Image: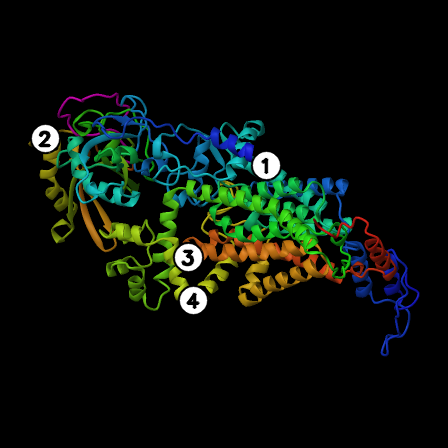
Amino acid sequence: MAAVMLTAVLSACDQGKPGVDTANPETGLCHAVVTPEEFDASSEPSPPVPCAEPHTTQTFQVTTMPEPLAKQEARPNQQQLKAAGKRLCTSEDLRAYLSASSRDGTIGLAITSYFPDRDAWAAGSRAVRCDVAVTDHHGTPQEIGLDLKDALAGPHSAAVRLCYRQEYKDGILSDDGTDVPCSEPHTAEDISAWIAQDASLATSAGREARCLPYALEFLGTEKLPAGVGVQPIIRTVGTARTVRCAVASARQPAPGEAPELVTGTLAPQRVAVTGGAGKNG
Amino acid sequence: MAEHGFGNATQLRERGGKAQKAFTPAPVRGRKGTKARPLGSLGRYLARTFGPGALTLGPVHGAAMISGLVAAALMVVRLLVPEPVGMGDQGEGHGLVCSLGVMNQRPWDYTEFTKYIHPAWVPHQFYGEGCGANGTGEPNYSSQLLLLWLGKLLTPLTGWGPGLDTRAVGLVCCVVFGLLIAALINVLPGRTWFRILIAALFTGVMADGVFADFFISPYSEPAAFLGILGVSVALLHYWNGNGPRWLALLLVVLATVFTVAAKTQTAAWLPVIALAMLWVPLPRRAADGEAAVVEPPTEGTPAQDAVRRGNRWRALLLPATAVLLIVAFSVAFINAQPKRFAEVNLYNAVFVELLPYSPTPEADLEWLGLDPSFINSMDTTVASTRSAVYNPLYPQFQEKISLGTIAGFYATHPERLITMGERGVTAMLTPELGYVGSYLEGFEHGPYDKERRFPVVLGLFSAAKAAPVAFVGMQLVTLLLGLAVAFRKRSAVGRLAVVIVLGGWFQFWAVMLNGGQAEIYKQMIIVGFMAALCGPLLVALISILASEPGKVPERKRRGRRAKAQQGSADPAIVG
């Protein structure tokens, strides 16, 4: 009886559907990868979903496994594959996909890589799929309805842009701030210019002067627009102090009043969005 | 009760059923007066109440049913009241439970989800390698799926939401445990209260948080625990010789298959199970704990001898067939397990156990036929950044290292087994998994807090860590007493003790040789459970050996001998 029940249970097991072919992945497709195990799996054959619908990952690049691993008849193990994926799916490639300029700072983007399943590998496929996921501050992929293709150049980029929320105490803002996406309330927006602090950057004026050219580059203007100011923060890690250039709304709060927290980005739109319905900004 | 100081001994013997005048001389330095010592009285009272008495067999359905219900209810209460307790998942659960089409509702981050238990699993459609052994999608089969499946059926009825809640699995485990306790009482020998005492001690072992908490978890250990109890019950029933023999054997086969299918490491006690099945059932009368009649050797014709030998072989045919069935199943099951597990176990056996504890790791690598560059990966797991999987020569490891290679290494380096054994015993005596929590989040318990409401086994094991040799000695005593009870008292409980001790030792070395130090505390849980069962078994063995009914009254013995000589059917003579 136990054996019959065991057989019944095993046959009732839903080990997972085969899904789509993993031999020929395509760039730009979005997927609903929900569990850490799916995220870390060697292959990911879930059917793609429209990027305007809730999803967790998007394929930003498809490349080919190099030798010597590519020469192996049997697919390499998970660690070997994932190590190769780290070399093949780089943040530079991702930034290019996002149309990031050198002044665009990002937050909450995790890269993972997928490979052909064992059958597809045996059939000769060596395709490597590079996916990006938008994560929260714990590293958990978030469901988004945004197409990340050229996202940093478009109007819905705030969800992946790095901003800072500084504390307001005794009438002054703290030097450092908490990292948040610009879609959340913040006091300053990172412009991807981080400078080791030296004597010339000891004063606020010195820091602002040093960051000004980067701010202008970020804003795409020759002078600061009205209502926008340079507001660098100072990040201390161990004994190392780094000035992180940032811009912020220049509206002066009333005396004794905390500066207004803003959401969204100050970055200008550069090119048209390629698709997807954003919900950030 | 007693009119004089030594009256109880006589009374006790008389309670044995047959009046027997015993010579009880007055003690030379006895106490004056007629009052019995309180402790002595208590001991005699306990012996009268809980002693095995005549080792009678046969079911006691009423007591069994009530005890089973009480045992199950106690387990349910200890697991769910006042708040659920369980065993936190260290990441292994998904590979098994996902095959029921559910995903765990838990934090994404590893350190976050191990702090507490997360019993809720919600329906989810997995694709490809997203479900199965981590990262590979290879199906992970276990008889625990049967319990999980029943838990999945029960979950919606308990109001714990859709999908699967491991609290419901815990309920299923408690019910199965109650059934096994009821069955155990029916197959144990002796007085009803003696059976209840032993079953209560078994329940005490199971109720310790180091084992019971697994009932509310996604692990396959509960199937192993319940399987071991099931095998124990089935073997006792088989050896008792009650009912159809084929049915008794079938129960042993099913219980063993269930246990082996729980976790592959349990396959290590197959040799012991095989011997147990070939250890033919006890003669009915002898199983009653009475001395067997020694038949005088009779002169027989060669033809008669041949018939007797033939009968003996025929008696072994059925159990031998059953053993073959179990072995075939085990081989098939082990082959069906994820190859990934085998690879990781071999990796751990070399890089986590063999090399780091070696005085000459370079020489060991040479013996194994591996490139010296693998020394850089010593003391790493497959997931480490220095892992050998990143070595371009890793295929060499995959080609050259097998279980046979590891066994060959230790066969030629037996001195290494001593320190390995010491580490294993220490790990076995540390059964609490401190790296996973026992409680739900939000119940005023900190992260990784462990539940220790009934720490009987934990306490004994922790105390034994001061002298691990004494613990091994306790197992050895159990083995020897088991043999004594099996051969002197002709009781199946003795045989069971032998099987449990030897089975535990086989599993111990299987774990140490196949995976070794990596996650050793969890790997040793089943070995620890079998070792903990030595406690109840020791009580049973000592009680049986100390019991008087082993001495068969001379009048009764004479009667039996006469009956046997008349040629009447004697159940002592098997096949």
Res B104 visible:
no
Most foreground residue, B137 or A90: B137
Question: What is the chain letter for disc 1?
Answer: B
Q: Nearer the viewer, mark 1 or mark 4?
A: 4
Q: Name the residue that disc number 2 marks.
A: A220
Q: Name the residue that disc number 1 marks.
A: B172
Labelled disc at residue B517: 3
> Marks 2/3: CA distance?
59 Å
Residue at screen point 64% across, 50% down: B310
Res B353 visible:
yes
In the rendered view, would you say B304 is above or below B242?
Answer: below
The scheme the figure's colours follow is rainbow
Most foreground residue, B36 or A194: B36
Circle 3: residue type: Gln
Q: Mostly what secondary structure, the magenta segment?
A: loop
Circle 2: residue type: Gly
Instruction: Tell me, yes or no, whether dots 1 and 4 are on the same chain.
Output: yes
Can you name the residue that lies furthest to the right here?
B3
Most foreground residue, B290 or A255: B290
What's drawn in magenta, residue-wise? A258-281
Q: Name the residue that disc number 4 marks.
A: B414
> Marks 4/3: CA distance?
18 Å
Q: Quadrant of residue B365?
A: bottom left
